Amino acid sequence: MPLSRLSSPFLSGTNRVTLQMLQLLMALVPAVIAIVYFFGPSILITLTLAVVVALLAEAFMLKLRNRPLKPFLTDGSAIVTAVLLAIALPPLAPWWLTTIGILFAIIFAKHLYGGLGYNPFNPAMIAYVLLLISFPLEMTTWLPVSTLSEHPLGLASAFNIIFSGQLQGGIGLDTVSGATPLDAMKTQIGLLQTPSQILNQPLFGLFGGKGWEWINIWFAIGGIFLIFRRVIGWHIPVAMLAGLTAISFITWLIAPETTGSPIFHLLSGGTMIGAFFIATDPVTAATTIKGRLIFGAGVGLLTYIIRVWGGYPDGIAFAVILMNMLVPLIDYYTQPKVYGSVK
Amino acid sequence: MFTAIIAITLMALFFGLLLGFASIRFKVEGDPIVDQIDKLLPQTQCGQCSFPGCRPYAEAMAAGEADINRCPPGGESTIQALADLLEVEAKPLDDECGVEKPKTLAVIVEDRCIGCTLCIQACPVDAILGAAKQMHTVIADECTGCELCVPPCPVDCIDMVETKLNPNTWRWPDPAHVDLKLGGQS
Amino acid sequence: MTDELSSFPGGLILDGQKKRSTQTEIRKTPLSKKLTLPLQQHIGTPSAPIVKVGDKVLKGQKIARADGHLSVYLHAPSSGTVIAIDDQAIPHPSGLSGLCITIETDGKDTWIERQPIEDFTTLTEHEVRQLLREAGIVGLGGAGFPSFIKLNPGVHHAVETLIINGVECEPYITCDDMIMRERANGILDGIQIMKYALRVKRCVIVIEDNKPEAISIMKQALEERKECHHLKETQVVVIPTRYPTGSEKQLIQVVTGKQVPGNGIPIEIGIVCHNVGTTYAIGRAIKYGEPLISRIVTVTGTDVKHAGNFETLFGTPMHELLAFCDTHREQGEPFILGGPMMGYNLSGDHLPVTKTANCILVGVDNAAPDSTPLPCIRCGECATACPVSLLPQQLYWFSRAKDLEKTREYNLFDCIECGCCSYVCPSKIPLVHYFRFAKTETMNQEQEHQKADIARQRHENRLTRHELEKREKEERQRQRKAALAATKAAKEKEALSQTDNQEN
């Protein structure tokens, strides 16, 4: 066996970037199945479209930047970005919305910063925010789970909607769609309804949005699998969920009539995918142990603040991006004590 | 309007005082720029920059009269350091001054030396020992490899020898060359 | 007596691969025709030759003396003739050569007269250290630090604990394991002497729990001799297997819970650490008067057919040792000297075995891939694995950007180069190589700065001297001129007065 390395160590663990990305994708499978169950198979079309566009964009940028194709196309990072964005988009997002998002994520948020490992912001979240700001209508058009269970949407009709924007029979999508549970909670609290009244509406389930709560639970299970497999550390998810729980618990205690319960916040919107899959993106998160706790807690707090007092229904994407900006500062001030510096 | 003028005046006064106080209180005691530049130069005192030594060159640079790319012994790394310090663009070495060469040491071929002391007078760092009509020798540890002793020697007995690497001065090679261009602004 | 064991952050659980080389007992390597002895086999100043080409030497005869304080003597490993004192290839990662004494052996292996010392208490502590220095004893664990210095507590420190390091945490290496199994009594001899020289009461022999045979043998040997005055308060401590526990600082942390201060040495916190192999050599040197001329070398690896441990004379060419063990290695193919985590690769065939050569490794399982590393994804695995709590990913950025000042700020010089970070890196970045690069680069820069400072000082001195000379010269000239003018004036005056007188 010829020695390939100039310098020790000559041994190497089994840990690989590709392996980590693959396990991450595996951990997303149960939640995707849950999404299909509640929102219909349209997510599969969006996912496929996103992955294909992401790989093409990645290949194009690598060629343009004169980088080797194989190691970077197979590292799985582009696929992870695509899958995360696709899951974050509304199930019936038109094809052009997905395409614009992915192109922006890969080209602008990733490669213009230097590619894998060099991007300061989570590419999927940057793209999500861009789409949310640019196309607020399309980004908030969700079919309510209850409507879907009465009129299940087949793969063919989903395909139709995504690529032509029309339901079968020429009905426009906007006539049957509604707001997401988080959105509804916010607007209806604005209309002086109490959370318990709101939760009785067909849009909601036991604790959070109908369907949403189950999807969140499956994301959490996938995330725990990742922690168990040591793909991600426990620090960020735990800190983020703790931060979110703490602030929602306090405000809920103070004003139970005008705020959602902690459980509602934990099981609504993108809480779990954010905690386990998005905030934990190693490239853009803090790297020290203490830093990760601060980073996670910051994401949790900001998420709540944006959800409740901000102008957008869910705050995960903004919270993550805002905390990404603080990462260098956090890392600088949370350096561990080096051996020999304590007596 | 009158209050506005007063307010602005007072504020200007206040901030002016604050700034003045801060500039005294938090004054950065730094080396004068000439010293800082001089510190970056290799101190070979070879004069290849056309100045009589490193300090005069540093003074000329500080006065903006000389370019930063005139030091062949320092080479690329010195130019980079100077560019960083003076906040200007780094540029390639001025080939008018010479080319970057590996480090050398002066060695006197003893059986040819006639003891003329010319090299002793030429050496800028007093690294050559000897007396009239006596054989001279170079103190290897003090020699900067400036080559100034070579031209005055009437019998051509000074050789510039490349300094040899030994296991103690050896450096690990830069791994970045194995680490292909994989991203970032390399 | 021993407190609870402590722990250090990070570290790795590695596949030991120790069984490969512990199946047979320690064997002797056949005498080589030619022995090449580098003058630098330890940390510090190289030894200075005291023999000439053509001299006949006996086994154990001094052939080079200690040069300066941080240096030891060097001995002929066998009898024969000195045939060369010149630059030869030495086992060093640079592949450069260094000054060596080459001895052609006569095959008789005749010893010089030895002076065994039955009762070491007849010597003073200082005499013990002096004898060890003359016996050429240096740390055999890998670094090669002269042992006599580490046996000198000095006047400012009292030593509380002597730690005998039998941890051997690197995979594949088993020379310490085997010496404990087969020469436990010799190690105890050494411990007695070291405790005497250090005036220390307490001693712990630390062994990882993956060496049950060594543990039980050492315990038994200690039990048999527990009545010895100098073996009281000595005990075997078993610690969990984790890499890099064998590293001095980490071991101290595990055994005592204390940390050696940064830039400090263990004796500052009352601890002295020696390797078991060194301990054995110290025992031999005093009790039998045998200087350090051989060591146990582990030859192992996936490409070695008859792996094992070999008592090998210094200067024996490594290829002879490898041939003796029958390897699949092609001539000239690189191999590893030291362990797979901290060793370095060598490719020369004629490199000699030296005092610090603990293991020759040909072929490893789970070798680091030669594929191009991916970019760092800042996953932080390296920081989690680092036993010194550094931030390798940050150090990597700065080393790569050659921002040496920043690497220092992030404590690069506390890095022990254990390789844990590179091992766990999912992008397979050779982090340790970057750190070594940045370290040698920094040291080099520092040297250059020092040299430049001296040159500047000398140049300035010269300029002021010239200035002074010039001024003195001018002063002299002025004085001479003034004197000249004065005499001239005086003469003129005289002439005038004379004419005046004449006229009157």
Image: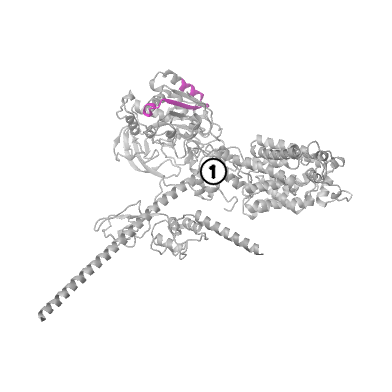
Q: Which residue is mark 1?
A: C431
Residue at mark 1: chain: C
**Percent x, y of residue B88:** 52, 60
Quarter of the picture containing the C terminus of chain C is bottom left
Kind of element beneath mark 1: helix
Seen at 66% across and 39% down, the residue is A239
- Which residue corresponds to the image point at 83% horizontal and 51% vertical from the top-left? A165
Q: How is the image coloured?
A: one colour
Residue drawn at (31%, 61%) of the image: C466
Would residue C82 appear left or right of C326 to someone viewing this image? Answer: left
Mark yes or no: residue C13 visible.
yes
Which stretch did the figure color magenta?
Answer: C195-219
The one nearer the camera, C230 or C488, is: C488
Picture coordinates of residue C333 (x, y %)? Answer: 49, 41
Determine the residue located farthest toward the front in the rendered image: B2
Q: Amino acid at mark 1?
A: Leu
- Residue A262 horizontal/vertical position (percent): 74, 38
Examine the image and state in which quarter residue B44 appears.
bottom left
